[in-house]
Image: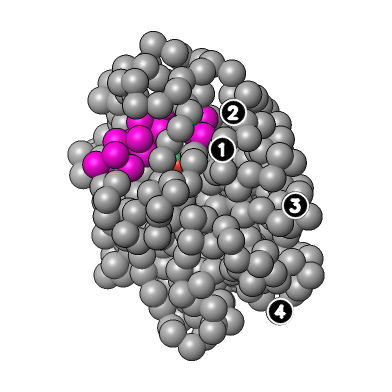
Amino acid sequence: MKPINVGLLGIGTVGGGTFTVLQRNAEEIARRAGRPIRITVVADKNLELANKVTQGACRVTDDAFSVVSDPEVDIIVELIGGYGVARELVLKAIASGKHVVTANKALLATHGNEIFKAAQDKGVMVAFEAAVAGGIPIIKAVREGLAANRIEWIAGIINGTTNFILSEMRDKGLSFDAVLKEAQRLGYAEADPTFDIEGVDAAHKITILSALAFGTPMQFERAHIEGISKLDAKDIKYAEQLGYRIKLLGITRRTPDGIELRVHPTLVPSKRLIANVEGAMNAVLVQGDAVGATLYYGKGAGAEPTASAVIADLVDVTRLHTADPQNRVPHMAFQPNQLVALPVLPMEEVQTCYYLRLRVEDEPGVLADITRVLADEKISIDAMIQKEPGEGEYEADLVLLTHLTREKRVNSAIAKLEKLLVVKGKVARIRMEELGK
Ligand code: HSE
């Protein structure tokens, strides 16, 4: 049967993996897709690398724009990343009537609305399984496998770099800076790790999952984003003593007042499966009203795990490209005219539980002062531990866990606590999620 022709933009780690897996499993993939999937041209600025990977098996060029308008190409695979030239190339490919497969979460979270509208108008598919959690088929699960459900919330470890760093901090009792340096030396963290460690990469991914779960446009600019760079190893240790692990979670939740969309370090009960996801692995927990909780686990990055998702999309597009566009799976899970612009709640309105650590003078009346502030803000305390002052010290760490409360009450309480003479320095605050029901 006539092969379907693919133009591959970018032959870095994921592009190379895609090339290799497509070649290695060509026969099996053709049996699934109904026809061979053939990379006919690869575009990369680094021609030497492109030639080295492809070994003469296809054309090679350094001009990606020539590929997106190449009449021989049916599907464009965009693995360049970023929102600059990648956006232009994707829009140009769509305008040329080509289907697109992309791993580019930054692009979809920030320009997805524009891209899906263009694709809809042109009757082409934009597939993006590899954009969230690498090899885990979470897009397919949320968009198709859970289509019966009213999804209530999603919480995911969707950045491997930060999960690796947190695991190492916990295991070895090291500081964030020390582990980051080691991760960079080993190649686990990028030379510029800002997007990963500051939570931006996770926010791109939870933005996409949120839109698919609730049938809304992408609302990345409304996401609350906090990374792990200010996390103190001490809090990881204290959390553990209280039966919790700290994970960088992407969380999105439906509430009567709007949607929560947030990324931040989070205490999770140690007994939850997701709390035990260690190293660079990813995991996504989805709560649906009919199915209950489902958990998806696997590699969120790397050449072949991500290629697995890219190629699954290629198979999907190959199977569906002759189908009438109205009868394909909608890009955003809900029919395009059924998207609802549910508001994203400001972080101040989010309700959750909190871990608070205060450095306090070790003298009578201190606890009374602190609990008075919390009581005034109607914040109820769930648990408390006081660490003994060290030899010759007059200050101690006091750790409090709160019941469910509103973020603005905690902000206000922290401001008051930091003004108390008996409280020294800043109050450390980490949000806490039971992730039960
Ligand atoms: N940088 C990402 C991570 C992988 O650390 O998980 C690609 O999304």
Q: Is residue 146 left or right of residue 392?
A: right
Q: How is the image coloured?
A: one colour
Query: Relative to 103, is 293 above or below?
Result: below
Question: What amino acid type is highlighted by mark number 1?
Answer: Val
Q: Nearer the viewer, mark 2 or mark 4?
A: 2
Question: What amino acid type is highlighted by mark number 2?
Answer: Val
Residue occupied by mark 2: 67
Q: Quadrant of ligand 1?
A: top left
Image: magenta residue range: 7-24
Q: Decide which of tag 1 and tag 4 comes sooner along the chain.
A: 1
Between 53 and 217, the residue placed more toward the observer is: 53
Q: Measure the alpha-carbon separation of dots 1 and 2.
A: 7 Å
Instruction: Please rate how many residues cluster around mark 1, counting C-alpha atoms within 10 Å: few if below 14, some from 14 to 19, many from 20.
Output: many
Q: Decide which of tag 1 and tag 3 comes sooner along the chain.
A: 1
Expressed as whole percent of the image width and height from the top left, the position of residue 407 reads 64, 61
Residue occupied by mark 1: 73
The residue depicted at 69 percent of the width and 69 percent of the height is 326
Between 198 and 418, the residue placed more toward the observer is: 198
Q: Residue furthest top?
A: 48
Element type at marker 2? helix
Verify CB contact (< 8 Å) between mark 1 and mark 2: yes
Query: Which mark is on residue 188?
Result: none
Question: What amino acid type is highlighted by mark number 4?
Answer: Pro
Residue occupied by mark 4: 256
The residue depicted at 34 percent of the width and 26 percent of the height is 57
Question: What amino acid type is highlighted by mark number 3?
Answer: Lys
Quarter occupied by residue 182: top left
Query: Which mark is on residue 122?
Result: 3
Q: Decide which of tag 1 and tag 2 comes sooner along the chain.
A: 2
